[in-house]
Image (cartoon, helix red, strand yellow):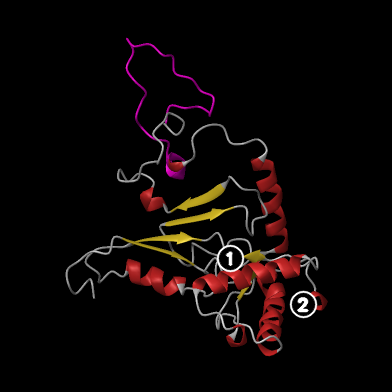
Amino acid sequence: ELDEQGRRLAVVSIPIFLWTDCSGPVDLGAVSEACRRPSRPMRTALVVDATQSVGAVPVDVQRTPVDFLAASVHKFLFGAYGLSCLYVAQRWWEDGRVEPLVEDEHFRAHMANADDEVPFDASLPGYPTAFRRGARRLDAGGRPNPILLPMALDGMSLVLQWGPATTAATLAPLTQRIRQRCMQELGLWTPARHGPHFLGVGPGPADACKTPEEVAAWVQAAAKFLKERSIYVSAKLKVLRVAPHLYTSIADV
């Protein structure tokens, strides 16, 4: 419709799965094709938040082209808070419209490494302004955290050893069983379509939650009830986020 009106949709920014209850997936292939369709008067950039996907399900930017894809390592890449991965399609590497959020010297072309120094002398020209080649022009400033990087490396090594496709296939029966038991035995709500790797569970009709505040109170009470029995889930605003992994057996659920 926007194309027909002669208006430009500059950016589409989407997740693959919803972070709270794993609703989805978004048909990334169809969105990618629509953004890149040659018949469109102007191309739309596709930005993907893959934090809830990378590591647990296959994600292939060669088969499904995207412009930017970002993922924090603290979810299914088994890293720690404070570090993220960013994929940038090659067509953006030298695009002058793409600049880092922080304007300092660390991602400039002249920097040999994160500790390279330029003498401070008012009589000399300022810092060179050319960026590094490739996606490194958008890298974070400063020295990478020496604690976070080895943790991320170990986590990604495990993920590659297991294989995202194998992880997804292993977890799918677990989340399906959780959904089935929650709905049939407890009368609770779960999303009709969800990913294989986690699931949101919310109050059902019998719980008679009529306001968002009542839903949030139910979620907090349910999470507390489970924690007292050594069952750990994440309490979100509207759902319990239940995320098994390869250490979880079908007998556990």
Instruction: Nearest to the eye among marks 1 and 2: give it.
Output: 1
Q: Residue at x 68, y 64 (%)?
A: 163
Label disc, if present, on residue 222 of the rendered structure: none
What residue span does the magenta drawing correspond to?
109-137
Q: Main secondary structure of the magenta part?
A: loop
**Relative side of 123 to 178, left or right:** left
The quarter of the displayed image where residue 232 is located: bottom right
Q: Amino acid at mark 1?
A: Lys
Residue 44 or 203: which is nearer the viewer? 203
Residue 242 or 101: which is nearer the viewer? 242
- Expressed as whole percent of the image width and height from the top left, the position of residue 84 reads 55, 49
* Badge 1 or badge 2: first in the primary sequence: 1
Q: Residue at x 39, y 34 (%)?
A: 103
Tell me the element at label 2: loop
Q: Amino acid at mark 2?
A: Val
**Relative side of 110 to 236, left or right:** left
Q: Is residue 226 magenta?
A: no
Q: Is residue 111 magenta?
A: yes
- Expressed as whole percent of the image width and height from the top left, the position of residue 57 reads 61, 68
Q: Residue furthest bottom?
A: 184
The quarter of the image holding the C terminus is: bottom right
- Expressed as whole percent of the image width and height from the top left, the position of residue 99 reads 36, 42
Q: How many marks?
A: 2
Q: Decide if residue 26 is in sight here.
A: yes
**In the rendered image of this protein, does residue 34 appear above or below residue 136?**
below
Reading the image, the residue beneath label 2 is 253
Label disc, if present, on residue 236 of the rendered structure: 1
